[in-house]
Image: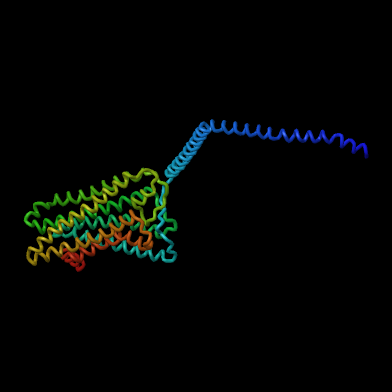
Amino acid sequence: MREKDTYEATNQPVVAYAELKQRRSRPKAAAGRTVRLTEFQSVIRSKAPALVTTASVIRGSLVSVAADYSEDTTQGDRIQLIINSSKVSYFTLAAYFDTSTLKYFCFTVVLSLYLLILCANVLLIVVICVNRSLHEPMYMFLCSLFVNELYGSTGLFPFLLLQILSDVHTVSAPLCFLQIFCVFSYVCVEFCILAVMSYDRYLAICCPLQYHTRMTPATVVLLIALSWLYSFLTILTLILLIAPLELCGNVINKVYCLNYSIVKLACSETTANNIYGLFITALTVFVPVILILCSYMRILKVCFSGSKQTRQKAVSTCTPHLSSLLNFSFGVCFEVIQSRFSLSSMHSMVHIVLSLYFLTCQPLFNPVLYGLNMSNIRKRLFAHKRR
């Protein structure tokens, strides 16, 4: 025990000296560390601009790579859509709905309407062709108008009857384009014939002495032929513009095929289609309507300045024509507005009825209107029935 105490007492100064030396060395180490930290910070500050530049370059490269990847992906998706568009061989008509038990009732109603249109128009065509007293310019134009009603209704009703009975409402692309040609050329011929008829009435009422020299049989044939030829060539050009379009879908929200419904499905550029569509709409609808209105303003001016008999004759011949024009213009204008703008607030059944209005009511409205209101046709019609 004494030896242990003696050892601790002897070594105590040595331990104390070592601890003191260690404490004195600590500030030096801390000072050394501070100097090294300061040097490191100065090096970082000197290299900071180069580091920022490098980071900017790296970031720009990453953004460029990302943009290229995104663009490649978008182009790839677009190419895939175009590849898929070449497979569109039919269209789905999405406006049809399930009528279940009413299917055959709707079929019967539409079939009856079609048969009534056929009978009424064919009857008046036969009456005009058979009676030589009706071989006048006005009745020749009416005969062409009735032929056009048969043409337009035949372009719609058989197709509509098949779709009503079918459970899958699809139509092949060639048949769809054929229906567009029939419907649109029907509209063009209708407006052209109505414009020609207004010119005929203008000559008959405002220039009666020059009527037979201007409105010769050759002129009548030429006006009718030009009306049909212009309409066919105009709509054929329209079909040639929409047929090559690359489509991204095949669903048409209609009960029959329409030009603009297909244009809206296109993935490719459609500027030419839109410009041409607006051009032929203006040329086929607005120009004839303006000519008709100008003709009837002249006719009204002459009627009010003439005798009572002249006014009665003008009213009896012009009223059916104006009524036909207003009826058809209403149906066509609604269809143009409906196809160009979204009318989502309107019920789907109202959409269908109004879109079919100009194709169903006009072919029935014209023969009834002209057959009942024009005395010469009415007399010949009842004369044939008595026989």
Q: Tell me: 381 left or right of 349.
A: left
Nearer-the-camera pick, 37 or 247: 37
Hey, which quadrant is residue 17 in on the image?
top right
- Depicted 181 relative to depicted 64: above or below: below
Choose top left, top right, bottom left or bottom right for residue 147. Answer: bottom left
Looking at the image, which residue is at 23% across and 64% down?
368
Q: Where is residue 314 shown, x and y percent of the image? A: 13, 63
Specify the color scheme.
rainbow
Q: In this image, 250 relative to 185: left or right?
A: right
Q: Position of residue 121 (x, y in %)?
A: 25, 60
Between residue 282 and residue 31, name the one nearer to us.
31
Residue 279 percent across, percent down from the top left = 26, 48
Quadrant in which the N terminus is drawn = top right
Q: In the rendered view of the protein, which quadrant contains the C terminus?
A: bottom left
Instruction: Left or right? Give the position of 287 relative to 239.
Output: left
Would residue 135 be visible to someone looking at this image? no
Residue displayed at 39% across by 53% down: 252
Of all residues shown, which one is farthest toward the bottom?
386
Front position in the image: 115 or 51: 51
Count up the numbered dots: 0
Asked if residue 314 shows in the view, the reply is yes
Q: Is residue 25 above or below residue 247?
A: above
